[in-house]
Amino acid sequence: MKSLKFVKHLGTRLFLAAAFLLPLAAGFTSPAAAEEDSPRAVYTITNAASGNEVLVYDRSADGSLTFQGSYPTDGLGSGAGLGSQDAVVLSDEQHWLFVVNAGSNQISSFAVKRDGLELVDVVDSGGIRPVGLATHGKLLYVVNAGESGNISGFEVGNDGLLAPLTGSTQPLSNGGVGAAPGPAQISFSPDGDLLVVTEKATNLIDTYEVEDGIAGAPATHASAGATPFGFAFDKRDHLIVSEAFGGVPGVSALSSYKVEQDEFEVISPSVGTTQTAACWVVISNNGKYAYTTNAGSGSISSYRIGKNGTLTLLEAQAGLTGNGSTPIDMALSNNGKHLYALGAGSHTISIFQVQEDGSLVSLGGVGVPAGVVGLAAR
């Protein structure tokens, strides 16, 4: 991946960045103000078996959402929940949006425009039933949860087209034999040197070393608690993982790990939420707080993250989404001021304002169609 083309591209980016320093110093719009002026939106997918679509909601400065439009993916959804995190992801620079088409075994790529989305590519996922995506720079990886399951990689072109990476397809912990072990999420480490996959059915966490964009064979590690599900990396590269414990009432948790190419070490094992079915995880922009949706409790739990990656439960019910709401996917706005939680049971996106101390203030919500999955925000 470190090609001459990439080096030239990087050089161009550095030149452009330097060129903008003078105007900023002369009193032009600051980066913080520019963020407020940039397009703001929240994205989810219908996952309909008759034809998958991306739903776009414009995001106001106060966090409120207004339906903007729907955009066909030219693929099919599964028509049922995916049991995964990151079915919808934005590229690092948020120029591209990628979504899974679990019913047609495809991935769709969209250009993000100020007035909506433009479909640019639809490709085979390299497996059966894609459920989650991970992006880093020019790389996109997918985890497929059907048949034996696998991961597979793509290079993202400057035009948003997706090119399969030869040699990037790797099995999960089962070595490609038998039924898939319930993969829930795939994601890159912050430096892009590792891919991580959680497995619900085996209580394992898989890591893959990535060299020149190609994932190697998986290394498997025991999860600190049962049913590892969603996860995120904090500002100091600690891995924060939710544990659903099979949906047993009141016993779900979060764990943290130190993860490097040759190291996988538990920091805080299974710090309980006191809630049911902790599944999806996001981390505040300042890296101090972690949030997990409790699908079985209609709540969001908050944790403090120590500098060494230790976890402390702050509020078991930092946010409430309602009885029977089944909160699943979450996403933070670019500026970190608003947290969005998708309710699979209530068919809503709940909106919360994130306070300096990590607490959440409910700002209501907006209705969405039944069956939607995945959530991304900018």
Image (tube, rainbow, N blue to C red):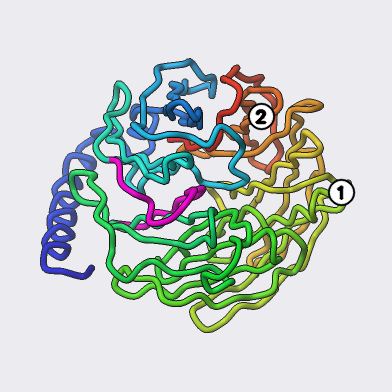
Secondary structure mostly seen in the magenta stretch = strand
User: Can you say whether 47 is above or below 197 in the image?
Assistant: above
Magenta residues span 122-137
* Residue 103 spot, x, y in % from top left: 47, 39
Give the image quarter of residue 11: bottom left
Q: Quadrant of the C terminus?
A: top left
As helix, strand or loop, the secondary structure at mark 1 comes to: loop
Q: Callout 1: few (<14), some (14-19), or many (20+) C-alpha neighbours within 10 Å? A: some
User: Can you say whether 310 is above or below 73 in the image?
Assistant: below
Tell me the distance, in whole angstroms, between the alpha carbons under discs 1 and 2. Answer: 20 Å
Mark 1 touches mark 2? (CB < 8 Å): no
The residue located at (58%, 71%) in the rendering is: 174
What residue type is disc 1 on? Thr
Residue nearest the observer in this picture, 203 or 68: 203
Check the image and name the residue furthest to the bottom.
262
Residue nearest the observer in this picture, 318 or 143: 143
Figure label count: 2
- The residue mark sitting in front, 1 or 2, is 2
Residue nearest the observer in this picture, 16 or 100: 100
Q: Is 296 on the left-hand or right-hand side of 118?
A: right
Q: Is 227 on the left-hand or right-hand side of 220?
A: right
User: Can you say whether 270 is above or below 327 in the image?
Assistant: below
* Residue 153 spot, x, y in % from top left: 35, 60
- Residue at image mark 2: 343
Q: Is 77 on the left-hand or right-hand side of 202?
A: left
Sequence-first disc among 1 and 2: 1
- Residue at image mark 1: 274
Give the image quarter of residue 228: bottom right
124 within the magenta span: yes
